[in-house]
Image (cartoon, rainbow, N blue to C red):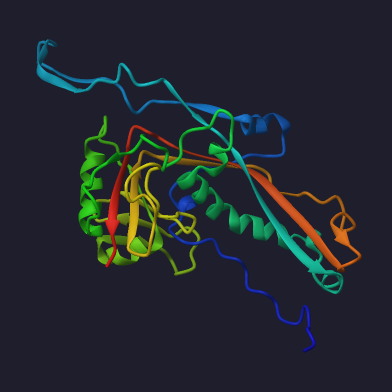
Amino acid sequence: MARFEGIFDAPDLQVAPCGLLSVAGVVTSTDNPNSEAWIRGFDTLTNSSPTIRILSNSNAAVSNGTIFDGSAVPAYYSTEPFYVEIETKNTGQNLMNHNPFDGYILTQLEAASQKAAEYELWMGQASKALTPAGTGYLTEAGKATTVTTGGSAPDKALALLEQGIADSPTGARGVIHMTRDVASVLGSKLMYEADSQLDDEAYAVTRLGTSVVIGSGYTGSGPTGTTGAAATATNKWMFATGSVGVVLGEARIDNESLAQGFSPATNDSIVKASRPVAVRFDPSIWLTAQVTLP
């Protein structure tokens, strides 16, 4: 069957709504060399775990007046950036109609960056590959406090996470992270705000107003080493954290020309593009709940 290239325009790639970039504080770096020093890693000052006390009206200490003792909380926590890379393969004939240097490969990279950041935030694959291993991903062993005993119904797990957020040092708003199937089962327990179903800025909140990230890159697995950590069709995990942030570096095509990556033997051209990304969350809230889906 003959193939016809370039007759129909492909639809624009859409970023999944209610994803990480709709909730996180997003910083986009420039191509200024001084602005990308963060790629080698950076530390964030902790400002959400102060010591909190209740005093009498004479400024005196009272019995059981310490709400939270933050004296042992580290002043900084580290973030390890990573790279997102995409690769496309085109035939020599296809290159006549779709030149990757015209920008469509960068559109693909922009669309894929959110899912890649979600995957790394949940699984920490790039962080675990470091020597010594990095930290600060959701499923890191021994870090999140489990609020369920075995698998719970999605609405109960959500309620337990909400209460756990209230028990955080300052009672901060928090962010709840879940997969799309868990969000679908929760139904009216979540509320959505969007101008349309394809609105990149769409976001979700719980009925209490807690921000929700419904990540296409989230795997649903639980903390490493925990019983039942493996995600299945009926076994998933949710997490709650403090605020989240993402840094997006400059997106670049790695090939210097179409000749680089072209194979005359197969008439295929391999083109790659990449960008540095960093994703972090405030660990003053770090909770998890095991969910049994119907």
Left or right: 266 as drawn, with respect to 127:
right
Q: How many marks?
A: 0
Residue situated in front as seen by the camera: 204 or 139:
139
Left or right: 176 as drawn, with respect to 130:
left
Point out residue 93 in the picture as x, y percentages from the top left corner: 86, 74
Residue 260: quarter of image: bottom right
Residue visible at 36% across and 34% down in the picture: 143
Point out residue 210 in the picture as x, y percentages from the top left corner: 30, 49
Residue visible at 62% across and 55% down in the picture: 110
Residue situated in front as seen by the camera: 230 or 286:
230
Q: Quadrant of the N terminus?
A: bottom right
- Name above or below for residue 194 compared with residue 156: below
Residue visible at 40% across and 37% down in the picture: 141
Q: Quadrant of the C terminus?
A: bottom left
- Name above or below for residue 268 compared with residue 131: below
- Name above or below for residue 79 compared with residue 271: above
Residue situated in front as seen by the camera: 139 or 251:
139
Residue visible at 59% across and 33% down in the picture: 130
